[in-house]
Amino acid sequence: MTELDLVVPRGRPVLGVVVPAHDEEDLLGDCLAGLRTAARAVGDRARVDVVVVADACTDRTERVARRHHVGVLRLAARNVGRARAAGADLLLSRREEPATWIATTDADSVVPPGWLVAQLDACEAGADAWVGTVEVEDWSGLAGPVRARYGDLYADGTVGDGHRHVHGANLGVAAPAYRAVGGFPPLDTGEDVTLVRRLDDDGRRVVRDRAHPVRTSARTVGRAPAGFASHLRVLSEMHVIPTSPGTLPAEPRCSRRRGHEGGPAARIS
């Protein structure tokens, strides 16, 4: 039992949380502190089991995870899709109290206090998956126009009270639905989009939540190719590349980042 595994009567839901991490010693501590707070908020309703998948790490990522008393799974894939899948498989295959729900976030992100409450509510209401949004924690290292352009593009992905974004940093899925669609594919980018697309295509009930955004870093050099950091870098480069008088930089194809055009799970930015 880890520090985040709260003692509750048997038969209660088990929320497994997967955190893929590649050389994240600097940011992982804040991530796990946020998860601890979120776990306490459901302490009387569910057990929380957190696993950090230390994927091809050369720094002290594993040490940070163990200092926070969470599970650690070593991997040498250097592939975020494989890392998320390996963590999910471990949690789902526990001999005693396997996970009934798999949530995922990223090591450079901090979940809000009500993050697991919202997912547990969705789970108990019969949802097959829950998809949240993200917000950048600190824009100070990027030019002002980047933040404005990002906000415009992100707003384009909202639909009424819902949204069409997909982020591995803010995602949850019921164990039966996860198994039914084959889980996370072994992709180095877009594993989250593909999973949600499979759920949509299979007619699963996917809750899209805008009320519990995860705060994520504004770094422009990330761990996954064409991931969120790459998206911010493209927006940043739009404002530093010289152009001819009277012309504008080409628009980045943000709506197709890590996904395909069209469909409920296609808008990723």
Image: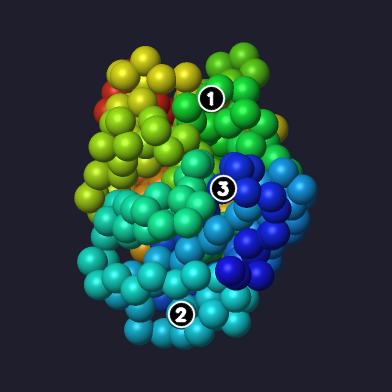
Name the N-terminal-most of marks 2 and 1.
2
Q: Name the residue under label 2.
A: 62
Pick the front one: 191 or 68? 68
Pick the front one: 255 or 1? 1
SS class, disc 2:
helix
Amino acid tagged 2: Glu
- Mark 2 packing: few (<14 Cα in 10 Å), some, or many (20+)? many
Q: Are marks 2 and 1 in contact (CB under 8 Å)?
A: no
Distance between mark 1 and mark 3 Cα atoms: 15 Å
Q: Residue at x 30, y 31 (%)?
A: 180
> Is 127 on the left or on the right of 139, as rendered?
left
Q: Mark 1 points at which residue?
A: 127
Amino acid tagged 1: Ala
Pick the front one: 205 or 213? 205
Distance between mark 3 and mark 2 Cα atoms: 24 Å
> Is 179 on the left or on the right of 206, as rendered?
left
SS class, disc 1:
loop
Q: Are marks 3 and 2 in contact (CB under 8 Å)?
A: no
- Mark 3 packing: few (<14 Cα in 10 Å), some, or many (20+)? many
> Is 211 on the left or on the right of 218, as rendered?
right
Q: Can residue 81 be seen in this view?
A: yes
- Mark 1 packing: few (<14 Cα in 10 Å), some, or many (20+)? some
Q: Can residue 252 be seen in this view?
A: no
